[in-house]
Structure formats: structure tokens, C-alpha cells
Image (cartoon, rainbow, N blue to C red):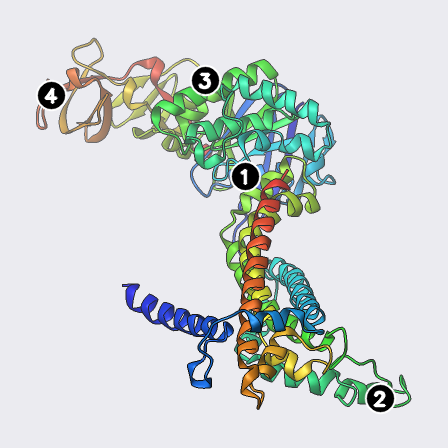
Amino acid sequence: MLAPALLVLGGLFLTGLGLSLLRSFRYIPALGLTDPDLGAYAAVLTAPGFLTSLGLSLWIATASTLIASTLALGAALLLRQTFTGRAIISFLFQINLTIPHVVGAVGILYLVSQSGSFARLAHAGGLIGAPSEFPPLTHDPFAIGIILTYVWKEVPFIGLILLASLQSIRPEHEAAARSLGANRWQVFRHVLLPLLMPALAAASALVFAFAFGAYEIPLILGAHAPEALPVAAWRSFTAIDLATRPQAHAMAIVIALIGAVLLALYARVALRKGGRDAV
Amino acid sequence: MTLELHLLTKTYPGAVRPTVRDLSLTVPRGGVTALLGPSGAGKTTVMRMVAGLLAPDTGDIRLDDRSLLPLPPERRGVVMVFQNAPLFPHLTLAENVGFGLRMRGLPSAEIHDRVGAMLERVQLSGLGSRRPHQLSGGQQQRGALARALVLKPRLLLLDEPLSNLDAALREEMRGLIRALQRETGITTLVVTHDQSEAIVLADRVALLLDGRLAQEAEPDEIFARPASVAVARFIGGVNFLPGRCVQGAFECALGRLPLPSDASEGPGTLTIRPEALRLGPGPDARVGQVLERTFLGSQTRLTIVLAGQRLEALVAPDTARHFAPGDPIQVSLPVDALWVIPDAAG
């Protein structure tokens, strides 16, 4: 049953990865490169902006994941309660799952850039002298607009996964913990959070991987320098000079490797921490 | 600690009737009281109110004459053992048993010692490092009991503690609960829908029907002297004869039956438990006819028609073998097994 799906997915993924790997070793017969070497990797890793770009990408992914996970956790805990209007709030909470990232990024640009709605509102309200005095939240060195977009988009994604996980946790566990002397915070800290940790770790790992490796949002909302690693890879890949193509592939492979290693470490630490901190 | 429930009432949002109505009950210090009743009678609601997990609409809950209502669950000194979620799945058995002690901020060494001693007491020594899914159902229940008792609570609440266990484990667990309760002297309230569980575990039984306290007494008294027809039916009563008490005898379709001396005068319903009917010749025997014979395992049920009244008898299968449907049968109703429920009691 799974074989056709695996064949298509695995085939496409592995073929793409294999081709990229070959080209990253400067093996592109169409360009006359037929002697594989590590030159592209050396060029990428020793490039002056590499570490800064890597740092920026790590910052974007880490901040987006932490903020989105925290907000999603709070939202999921609130949405599991019974209250009037819960269905409507739940619908509104999920609605932006259907909106593409790029549309969200453009929306953020219109809202929070120095020429955006908030800047004009602040100016009209007399809070700032000119729209340009509005704090730079897009194309800024701290990537605030990028992080905002990821948080806006990923909170419902993580929240829905957590809600599903919460529904599988028997309410008697919380009641038993209260009865055994735990206050509300202790119940959350020592019972709910550890029981949610596998779902939280999985969901936030996906968000981290996406935010670390995707180029569209940093391309739209990011500063020109430093630029996030995937943006640098994309610029190399689309450069007129075909000689930079192996470096683009090398950068993509480096991004994939770093992402995979960080994900493995994160998942391991998060799951272990969940179990150890339980008591 | 003496637990007193005073006129407790609880209606869930959207419900048309209260789940618990005007319930008043005293659980004596150091004793075990079983809150017995069918599903939906409000038993678990009462437990949750006592534990502080649910607020009553009206009424009071007092432990040693101090109201528990202003206190959150963690400060009541009341520990509840749940039916469906015995142990936290993410913790080992030892961590589970030590959970409450850790929440109280006790030193690790003391927690370690107390958990070890408690695990030994419930015969789970050596299993402390196992997770709940690596334990049997019986071991999990014992672990949950240990987790509660290690805290030395003022009041212990057990919600259907034996319902998820097979027959052999139920016996073992019953014995353990009784033994531990006697050792510790902790006042205990047990919720159960199973009469046999209530009888074996409890000193007193409070029967809850439709959210109201139908009767509260020692187990044998509830069986011998049910307060109402509903109580009698719940505890397995099937023989009911309408009639009237007149001068120490009950006048009904079977004629005039002599009664124990304390029967009160007036209209009522006579009841006799099916296992109390005597079959075969006797000085007061009446002749009826066997309608049906049903083998139930350790007993056989004979349905008998006597003077147009349908009665059921539970007898040993060996005795029942002599009677087939349609056969005549002699039946006696021993005076000391008769009980009249006055009509006013319903």
C-alpha cells in the first residue's frame, strides 16, 4: 500500500538530493566540470559572510520556534476549555493555516514596515513625527518581520497538533495530580507539559526545520546584509554566472546537514528533558 | 477524621435535574463507607466535590468540623484514587509514588525512604524503575493506592478501585485495601456500583439512587431491611408482594403470613430475598409450580408461581435438579427472612 507513495516521494527526494550532492562536488558535465572536488564547499565555508548568515538563520529559526511554541501551547490550553464562543475562536485560530506564507509575508510588510499601516496610524495618532520614525520591523538586522511572519503562520500549526495531543490525555491525570497536592502550576509543569512534550517536540522541530531552510520569507522581509543562508543559496543558484552553481548546491547541502543535525539534537534533548523533568 | 456532607446539591450546566440532591452523610472517623449506586447515580460527582475538583451548588463538606469548601484540592488533605487513570504514564512507579511528596517539597532522601517502604508494603519492591505500561493492571492499582497512602491523607477517596481487575486480582486487592485501611486507620470513602465490593470493603454502605441518599446503614442491614422497594431492587430483591400489616401478620395474595415482632401496621410491600426461600416439605410449606429453571453457575434460579404470585428462588444446582418447569413445588417463607417496606417509603 505504501510502496507507490514511498517510491514517488523517496525517488523524487533522493534523486534531487543526489543530483545536488553531485553538483556540490563540482560534477556538472554540461558545464565541462567532470573532476569532482570539494572546492565549492571550501569556497562556501570560507566566504566572509557565511558565519553571519548562518547565525542569522539560526536566530530566525530559534526565535520563531520558541515564540510560536510558547504561544501555541498557551492557545491550545485555552482552547481545550469549554467557554461561550469557543467554536468561533477555534475557527479564527486555524484560519491562517490556509493562507500561504508569501501572502502572510506581504501582509506583514503592509502592516509593520515603515511605510505600512501601523506606521501611518502611529503618525496620524501623533505618536511619531513621520512614518519613517516607526521602528524598523522589516528588512531589519534582527529579522523581526520574518520572525513575526513565521510566528503568525506556525502558531495554529503547532496549536492544532497540541490540541489533538491534549485530547488524548485523560483529564483524570490532572485531577489526580491536584488531589496528590500539586497546585495548578505544578500540574502543568510536572504532568501536562511532559505528557505534551513528544507532540511539542515534533511540531516545533518541523517549524524549526522549515524556518531554517526556507528562503521566501527572508527574501521578502529580510535585510540585504546580512542575508539568511537559504537566501544566499538562492542568489547563488539564480546568478548569471553559472560557475557559482556548485557553491549554491554546496550551500543547500550544508543547510540540509546543519538542519538535520540540529533537529536530531533538539528532538533528543526535548524528549529527554520532558521525561527527566517530570518529577 | 470525620467527614460530614451536609445537604449537598450539584446540577451540571445544561442538565434538567440535579445529579446530587440534598445529600447528607457522615463517614465516621477511621471507618470505611461505601457510596454504592448504579451508573449515573451521582457517586463520582460526590467524590469530586469532596476532593475539591468540583464545587457544589449548595451544601457543605466538613472534615473534623472544618469546612473544606474554601480550600483548593491540594490543601484539603484528601487524596482521590481514580478508576481510569491509575498512574502517570510518563513517570516510573517510584516517581509516581513519590509524586505527592515531591509536590510538598520534601527532601529527596525522605522521599526515597518513604517510597521504598510503601512499595514494599504493597508488594511492589523491585519494580520502582518500571513505567506503568510495564506493570500489570493489578500492580498499577496497587501503585496508585501506594501513591495515595504514602501521603498519609486525612481522608482517602477510592473511585471504583476494583472495577478494572479480573476476579482473582479483585480478591487480592480487596484484601490489601482492607488491611492497609486497618493499619493506617485513614477515614475512607469508596465509590462502587458493585454490591459485593461494597459489602466486603466497607463498614457502612450509603446507597445513592438518582442523586439522593436512599439508605445508609451497615451492609447486612441494607440487605436484610431495605428502606424502600428501589433499594431492595438495587441489591437484588426480586420478590415483592403488596398487602397490609395487621396485628403482627402480613395479609397478601398468599394469605396471612406471620411477621417478626417489629413490623409496623399499615399497607406495605413484603419482600424476601430469593436465597431465603425454602423449598421442599415443611410445616408452613405451600404448593406452587415451577415456571422456569435457569442455571447461573454456582446457583440456579427457579421461577415459581405461588397463589398467582411470581416468586424467584436461588438454590444450589444440586437442589434445583429435582425440579423441572411444570413440576409442583413446596415453598416456605421463613418468618425471620420477611421484611415489610411501608408504602410511604416507596
**Mark closer to the observer (3, 1):** 1
**Residue at image point 54% right, 41% down:** B90
Return the mark for residue B175: 3
Q: Which amino acid is tagged 1?
A: Phe
Q: Is residue A137 left or right of residue B96?
A: right
Q: Helix, strand or loop at disc 1?
A: loop
**The one of B15 and A213 positioned closer to us in this rendering:** A213
C-alpha separation, residue under disc 1 versus residue under disc 4: 55 Å
**Mark closer to the observer (4, 3):** 3
Q: Which residue is mark 1?
A: B88
Image coordinates of residue A274 in percent, x first then y, are 60, 46
**Mark closer to the observer (1, 4):** 1
C-alpha separation, residue under disc 3 versus residue under disc 1: 25 Å
Image coordinates of residue B2 in percent, x first then y, are 66, 24
Which is nearer the N-term, disc 3 or disc 1? 1
Q: Quadrant of the N terminus of chain A?
A: bottom left
Labels 3 and 1 share a subunit: yes
Q: Which amino acid is tagged 4?
A: Phe
Q: Does residue A174 appear in this view? A: yes
Q: Helix, strand or loop at disc 2?
A: helix
Q: Which amino acid is tagged 2?
A: Ser
**Mark closer to the observer (3, 2):** 2
Q: Chain of mark 2?
A: A
Q: Vertical placement of B60 versus A231: above or below? A: above
Q: Which residue is mark 4?
A: B323
Q: Which residue is mark 2?
A: A132
**Residue at image point 68% right, 71% down:** A50
